[in-house]
Structure formats: structure tokens, C-alpha cells
Image: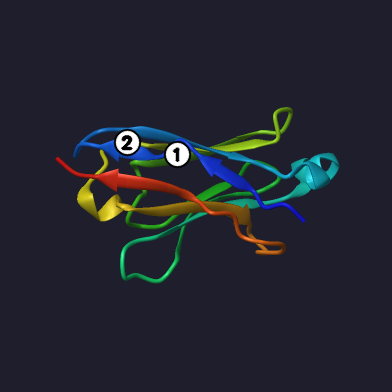
Amino acid sequence: QRPFVASGGGLVPPGGSLRLSCLAPGAIFSVFSGYSIAWYRQGPGEQRELVATITNSGNTNYADSVKGRFTISRNNSRKMVYLQMNHLGPDDTALYYCHRIERLGPWGQGTQVTVSS
């Protein structure tokens, strides 16, 4: 089974913004709209943590560390989930992953976000 594919990361200065994208694997396109999806991140030397979630009905939740700065959204027609990240700081530097909340199937390689002057 192919993983969810995260993209859109890069190098950004403090205070900047990035928009990450997550494409679902083709094998689940037919049921994507029924899945709840999450963004995770893993900073250097840190454990992977939950960043944001969006349910099949569009309800969202955020970690306290990103609340008010990040926005998760989805487009079921495109089989995509997005993470808009604003007011980025060095503590946001991490490898970002997307996956089902249930964490079934393989993990992708993620997309690197580096916040540095």
C-alpha cells in the first residue's frame, strides 16, 4: 500500500508562512471522504507529535503550540489535505507527515520545514 504524500516544505525565515499539501494514495480515493486525517511532525531529537486533525465532517483540532497560527483543511474532490502555517518560528522546524488518525498503512517520508534566519 502506498503512503500519504506530504509536500510543500522548505526553508522559511521566522515569521514567515508555508502551505503544506497531502495527497492520499490512489488505493483509498474511493473512501477518502470518510477518513479523518492528521498532520504530525517530528523535530530534531524529538518524538513525533500530533499537530492538527480534521474529521470526515470537517471538524478540526489543533495542538496548543500551533493553535491560532495553523489551519488544517481538506478538499475531498482532489483527495487532498492542507496545512496553512503562519507566523512560523524556530520551534516549528520539523519533518511533517500526514496520515489517517487511525495510523493504518505505511508512513510516508514527510516534508521538511526549516525555520531559520
Q: Secondary structure at mark 1?
A: strand
In terms of secondary structure, where does tag 2 sit? loop
Report how far apart the C-alphas of labels 2 and 1 lie in the structure.
Answer: 9 Å
Quarter in which the C terminus is drawn: top left
> Where is residue 47 shown, x and y percent of the image?
40, 71
Mark 1, Cα crowd under 10 Å, few <14 / some 14-19 / many 20+, is some
Residue in the picture at 35% in, 45% down = 113
Q: Residues within 10 Å of mark 2 (few under 14, many from 20)?
A: some
Question: Residue 31's x, y, as percent?
Answer: 83, 45
| x and y percentages locating residue 28 in the rendered image | 80, 46
Q: Are marks 2 and 1 in contact (CB under 8 Å)?
A: yes
In this orientation, which residue lies closer to the viewer: 25 or 52? 25
Of residues 63 and 93, the one drawn nearer to the viewer in this rendering = 93
Q: Which residue is mark 2?
A: 86
Does 102 sit above or below residue 88?
below
| Farthest residue, direction top | 77
Q: In the image, is 115 to the left or to the right of 76?
A: left
**Residue nearest the observer in this picture, 57 or 108:** 108
Residue at the image position 34 percent from the left and 43 percent from the top:
68
Quarter of the rendering containing residue 63:
bottom left
- The amino acid type of the residue labelled 1 equals Thr
Residue 32 is left or right of residue 101, and the answer is right
Task: Report whether 70 appears left or right of 55.
Answer: left
Q: Position of residue 96 (x, y in %)?
A: 45, 52
Residue 91 falls in which quadrant of the image?
A: bottom left
The residue identified by callout 1 is 71
Residue appearing at x 61%, y 54% in the figure: 99
Residue extending furthest right?
A: 30
Q: Residue at x 25, y 33 (%)?
A: 16
